[in-house]
Amino acid sequence: MKLIISLLLFMLILANSFSQSTNDVLNLLISNKTISQSQADSIRAEAALGPQQADASRKSFFLTAARQMQLTGYTQIRYQEFQESGKHNSFDIHRARVDLKGSVTPVFSYRLQADFAGSPKLLDAYGEIKLADYFTITAGQFKIPFSMENLAPVNKMEMIDFSQVVEALVARTKDVIGNQNGRDIGVQVGGTLLKIKDLPLIEYRLGVFNGSGINVADTANNAKDIDGRLIFTPLKGFSFGGNIYRGWDKAIKPDVPGHSQTRNRIGGEFSYTTTAFLLRGEYIAGKDGKTNRAGWYIEAGYFVIPQKVQILAKYDVYNPNTATPSNISTNYVFGGNYNFNSWSRLQAFYTIRQEEGPSVKNNFLSVQYQIGF
């Protein structure tokens, strides 16, 4: 009987496709004594149930768009335990981000990303025009094309914290322009200049920016900051290259033209990764006014259990003023990640901090749980 009813439902669908009334079909089947009245009523009920369920499903989604878009996000809940006197062990919401991406056509795309942890802020707001693999134009607010670590998606980073030199010289927490999450407002061109099969042999990016950070107009002068990046990938999994940045800090005397100090950066990097192993490092030097700064790091990791359990270590060095003796800060970071799946993981790292000069107890432990959608 179930087979007969299923066949009848299929016939009804076909009948509707030719604009024939469902009731007419059922009445004809009843008159020919193919089915009974009760069976016809049952079929009517089942036929009506499908559209009702589909309609209820559509109503449960509040986001609609004329074109396809991708809505993702993640939350990072962190616990930190400090050895340093005066700092309190605490939980916090490290990041809570919502990311919206979409393509209007194969050529035009866009992205909007906001972070709601602490003070809500707009991180990314840009459009892209991809005219060819070797020429893509990006305009709006986005990451400065400087530093491998800065450009890595934060929810994919192997370690919880950025390296000291990246925090200090790539528009993050200790930069002279303040914490801009590595971003600025401007225009960039970039792409792959040479590709063999799926291997991008030469990649470049060249950008012009305000130099003042996120959601801020140029506060230095009429000149704009210039950033360039060139990366070579001669072998699958191995890349190296360099970055250069020339710009200005905020005006020292806003009312006097030309009184802005330089804010320049230069860096080199390399990366070697396989499915189980990674080794990467960067060196970055910068000049803020008359102060020269420099730092570097090297990081290694290995999957003890493929794609599941990863152990890592980092040697992280930074000198905030190369003209000052006994000024170097060194971090030794050890820990690992446990990936529950592609959207959820647990990270734990212990950082041993050493500064030249008087010894200070300031080691700390960070544990972070990340869940995304």
Image: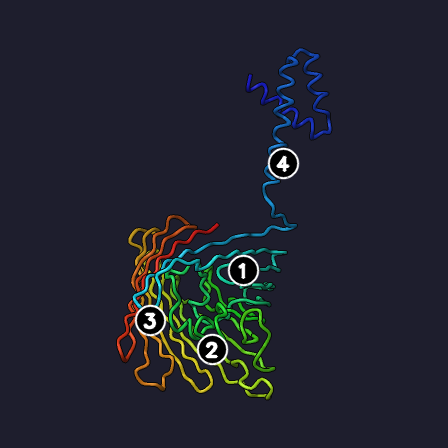
Binning the other alpha carbons within 10 Å of mark 3 as few (below 14), some (14 to 19) or many (20 upward) gives: many
Q: Is residue 61 visible from the viewing direction of this image? A: yes
Residue 321 sits in quarter: bottom left
Q: Would you name the residue on which mark 1 appears?
A: 114
* Mark 3 touches mark 1? (CB < 8 Å): no
Image quadrant in which the N terminus is located: top right
In the image, residue 228 above or below residue 345: below
Mark 1: which amino acid?
Ala
Badge 1 element: strand
Q: Which of marks 2 and 1 is nearer the N terminus?
A: 1
Compare marks 4 and 1 and give the one earlier in the sequence: 4
Front-most of 173 and 31?
173
Instruction: Give the Cα distance between marks 3 and 1.
Output: 29 Å
Question: Which element type, helix, strand or loop, lies under badge 3?
Answer: strand
Kindly identify which numbered label has been placed on residue 55. Answer: 4
Percent of width and height locating residue 181: 48, 67
Q: Name the residue under label 3.
A: 316
Q: Residue furthest left?
A: 359
Q: How far across and down, in percent of the image, does residue 239 sit? A: 40, 67
In the rendered structure, which amino acid carries the disc numbered 2? Val
Task: Give the SS element for disc 2.
Answer: loop
